[in-house]
Amino acid sequence: MSETHLLVVLLCMFAATFPVRYFPMVIFNRIDAPAIVKMWFGYVPIAIFSTLIITTLFGQDETDAAKLDIPLVISCLATFIFTLKTKSLGWAMILGFGIYLALRLTVNF
């Protein structure tokens, strides 16, 4: 794949996803929603992030579940514990990525 082709693909992906994410944010920032709606919207990122993590950890079907990625599980647990203790999501993500990378490069699982 050439660099030009890759750039065109990335620009098309941006053009397809940016309006869908940007315009609802602009519209909903102008509307004063009820407290229950604001609270519900607060859970949406958590639900999406949890879904991504669960499907990554345990696979999407039973054949994937049999191939548990031990370094990924260890790094997720460390990140979870670190986040609970420090409430710092940024540092927790850096720690989790560092642990995962270190385990992948040094230990043969």
Image (spheres, rainbow, N blue to C red):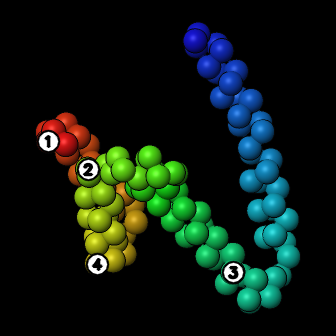
Q: Quadrant of residue 73?
A: bottom left
Q: Residue furthest front?
A: 62
**Residue bearing mark 3:** 40
Estimate the spatial distance between the alpha carbons at disc 3 and disc 4, rounded to whole Å.
25 Å
**Label 4 close to label 2 by CB (< 8 Å):** no
Could you tell me the amino acid type at mark 1? Val
Element at label 4? helix
Could you tell me the amino acid type at mark 2? Pro
**Residue bearing mark 1:** 107
Q: Is residue 18 left or right of residue 74?
A: right
Estimate the spatial distance between the alpha carbons at disc 4 and disc 1, rounded to whole Å.
27 Å
Estimate the spatial distance between the alpha carbons at disc 1 and disc 2, rounded to whole Å.
9 Å
Residue nearest the observer in this picture, 73 or 97: 73
Could you tell me the amino acid type at mark 4? Lys
Coordinates of residue 69 in the picture (x, y in percent): 31, 49
Dot 4 crowding, Cα within 10 Å, few <14, some 14–19, many 20+: few
**Residue bearing mark 4:** 85
**Residue bearing mark 2:** 71
The structure residue drawn at horizontal position 65% and vertical position 15%, both measured from the top left corner, is 5
Say which of marks 2 and 3 sits in front.
Answer: 2
Q: Quadrant of residue 81?
A: bottom left
Seen in the picture, residue 48 relative to 37 is either above or below; the reply is above
Q: Quadrant of the C terminus?
A: top left
